Image (spheres, helix red, strand yellow):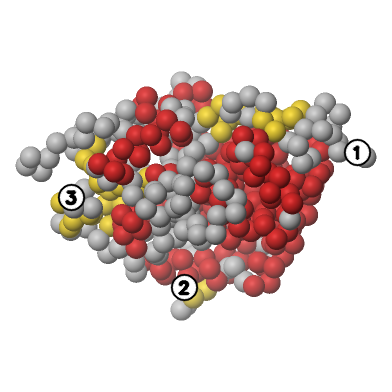
Amino acid sequence: MTGRQYSTTDISAATFWEGTAEERERTFAYLREHEPVSWQRPIENAVAPDPEDRGWWAVVRHADISEVSTSSDVFCSGQGVMFDQLTPEFLEMTQSFLAMDNPRHNDLRKLVQAAFTPKRIRRIDDQVEQAAREVVDAFAGDPSGELEFVEGCASRLPLRMFSAMFGVPEHLQEQTAAAAQDIVSWADPEHLAGREPAQVQVEAAQTLHRIAAEIVADRREHPGDDLFTGLAQAEVDGQRLTDAEIGAFFVLLAVAGNDTTKHTSTLTVKHLTEHPDQRDWLAGDLEERIGTAVEEFIRYASPVMTFRRTATRDTELGGRPIAEGDKVVMFYASGNRDAEVFDRPEVFDLSREKNPHVGFGGGGTHYCLGNQLAKTMLRALFRQLLTRVPDIRVTADPELLGTNFIHGVKRQPVAFTPEAR
């Protein structure tokens, strides 16, 4: 620690995270060029402030993000993946194998993957197309031609798919979505409404565990063809998931399965409004181009902004000495604007062929398990939007969620020409 000084480019301040993605990118661009691995003071607005927190390393280049992601023996997840130093019990309760290291990480991931049978995946793909059509059915013919997009569209498809996959009954779906939102909104004053961040997160996690326990108990008595039944029955090398492990996986998927797709689709409508040439290009051959376009949707939106690792031993990263126990935070939005990797990274280019974005992580053992499902939902939703309400457009700036984790949108009004019926 001797001689270590905090960077003069401060990205721990609450004001930094209250700005827009474009404002943050100006700072990240400077850091990528001049200080790609920088020592930062403890983050403001922590869920559980740690009086012994010394600070953390900010990793902003694509190459360094990939190195941290793929070197799980040097940069571990088991001590937490958020800025905050949360307890191991809370991490297990909320983040499943996301906050685990090998061998336990691989053992649990194998058990979970055993529940994703080819038959179940094929059925999910069919359900996505139908659900996307029904979500757009609900507003496409509205004669007002107006919609609050987050609540009226973007949140509905992932919630429906998550509920269908897990077999969440209708009377528990809104409660599930609200608790998942609490997990990631700890720094947003409007969402907290005077509550303590730690209290909000713990209560939300407990709510999701109760819902999971209720459904699992029912599936053991009445097996179905949903993921909860698969998780309850999954067995690898004689092991089965415990109720607590199923509950933690439910929490993880409730957050990841709802928020990333919801916010990517919301931000993409904004980006298509701002870049009508890209909308026209995509609509010109939707089926042929949607697959490539979705990768750019994710890169440009970068819905998950940060993840943390902890150094397991003294090492070096980007020319800086990292000490055992140091927190190392990866900034995916910055990695997705790295000019060393992307041609004209500031440009929203749906025809971008070379697109190794880190929107689902930088690779390695913790690469997002649900990345294919997220892409499937985005393809299905924008097929519906661009064929049925092709002129859908934002009418005011989005109201952003105040957090250093999710690039989220609370509200975004849109207008469109109603579909003829």
> How many numbered badges does the structure rendering display?
3
Q: Return the residue nearer the eye: 179 or 299.
A: 299
Q: Which residue is mark 3?
A: 320
Q: Using the image, determine if residue 229 lies above or below residue 324.
A: below
Identify which amino acid the numbered label 1 is placed on. Ala
Q: Which residue is mark 1?
A: 420
Task: Give the mark nearest the N terminus, 1 or 3.
Answer: 3
In the rendered image, is residue 313 in sight?
A: yes
- The crowd level at tag 3 (other Cα within 10 Å; few <14, some 14-19, many 20+) is some
How far apart, in angstroms, are the residues tagged by discs 1 and 3?
A: 61 Å
Residue 158 x/y as whole percent: 64, 48
Q: Return the residue nearer the eye: 221 or 294.
A: 294
Badge 2 marks a residue whose secondary structure is strand
Identify which amino acid the numbered label 3 is placed on. Arg
Q: Quadrant of residue 45?
A: top left
Q: Where, quadrant-wise, is the C terminus in this rendering?
A: top right
Q: Which residue is mark 2?
A: 239
Q: Identify the residue at the far top of this view.
A: 194
The residue under the point 74% across, 62% down is: 126
Q: Using the image, determine if residue 295 lies above or below residue 48.
A: below
Q: Identify the residue at the far right of this view.
A: 421
How far apart, in angstroms, are the residues tagged by discs 3 and 2?
A: 42 Å
